[in-house]
Amino acid sequence: MLRMSRVLSIAVASMPLAGAISMRAMTPAPTMALPNCSIAALSSFNITDVVITSATAVAASGPNPDYCDVIGSVATHGEGAGPGAARFQLDLPAAWNRKYLATGPGGVSGNFFKSMNPVDGGSALRKGYAFVTNDVGHQSDFFDASWALLAPGAPDKPKLVDYFYRAHHQVAVATKALVTQFYGTDSIERAYFDGCSTAGRNGLMEAMREPVLL
């Protein structure tokens, strides 16, 4: 009888635990606090010259929080050159610190490689920055400058002007507007640029030409 009572006690005691496990399994995982992370929602902000091509809610992993990974393009214009386009990648953390951090690619650009201090780049999302990079107006490999010519001896002026300064500035204007709309605020407390190589030149050009944006 003693042995049987022990078995019964164990069985009864284990029932609430089994119930708790079952209930826990039935409870849905919490959703990320990123209600605007969709092409439709971001496009509805109607930011001038911006086209959103993808918006992906990324779950927290390691030190990084939940964030919205946005890819889009900005139609570039003016500065004495014809129309162009610059693609951008913008990461929007669920817990935003009200600050904006920009960088850019190195070499002859043309991609989303972040040419910056890897410690800064690796901690941007964890620290809550809205974090953007862009391809400065063309798509190419790191050292492929063939995009700069329409034909031998014929420079592609829109792409060159974008590369030198236009793309970064106009992407900054557009993505800062996108950030404020996404978070439902009318201002960004601080805006920073962090870059080296061509990205460093982009930052220097922006500081000289449009210091109010930094």
Image (spheres, grey):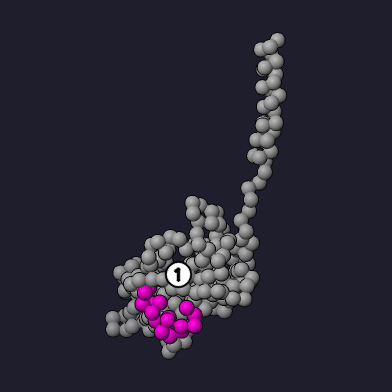
- Front residue of 101 and 48: 101
Q: Is residue 180 magenta?
A: no
Q: Is residue 82 visible?
A: no
Badge 1 crowding class, 10 Å Cα cut-off, few under 14, some 14 to 19, many 20 or more, is: many
Establish if 6 lies above or below 199. Answer: above
User: Relative to residue 147, is residue 17 drawn left or right?
Assistant: right
Residue 123 appears in which quarter of the rendering? bottom left
Give percent across and percent down for residue 141.
34, 67
Left or right of 145 in this view: 183: right
The quarter holding residue 84 reads bottom left
User: Looking at this view, is 3 or 25 the one in front?
Assistant: 3
**Can you say which quadrant of the picture contains the N terminus?**
top right
Q: Regarding mark 1 in the picture, which secondary structure is present there?
A: strand
Question: What percent of the width, then of the height, locates residue 126?
Answer: 50, 59
Does residue 206 belong to the magenta stretch?
Answer: yes
* Magenta part of the chain: 199-214
Q: Residue at x 69, y 33 (%)?
A: 19
Q: Residue 154, image x and y in percent?
A: 32, 84
Q: Is residue 148 visible?
A: yes
- Residue at the image position 47 percent from the left and 87 percent from the top: 78
- The image shows residue 49 at horizontal and vertical percentages of 54, 78
**Residue closest to the far front:** 2
Please state which amino acid type lies under the numbered disc 1.
Thr
66 w.r.t. 211: above or below: above
131 on left or right of 115? right
The residue indicated by pointer 1 is 133
Q: What secondary structure do most residues of the magenta stretch adopt?
A: helix
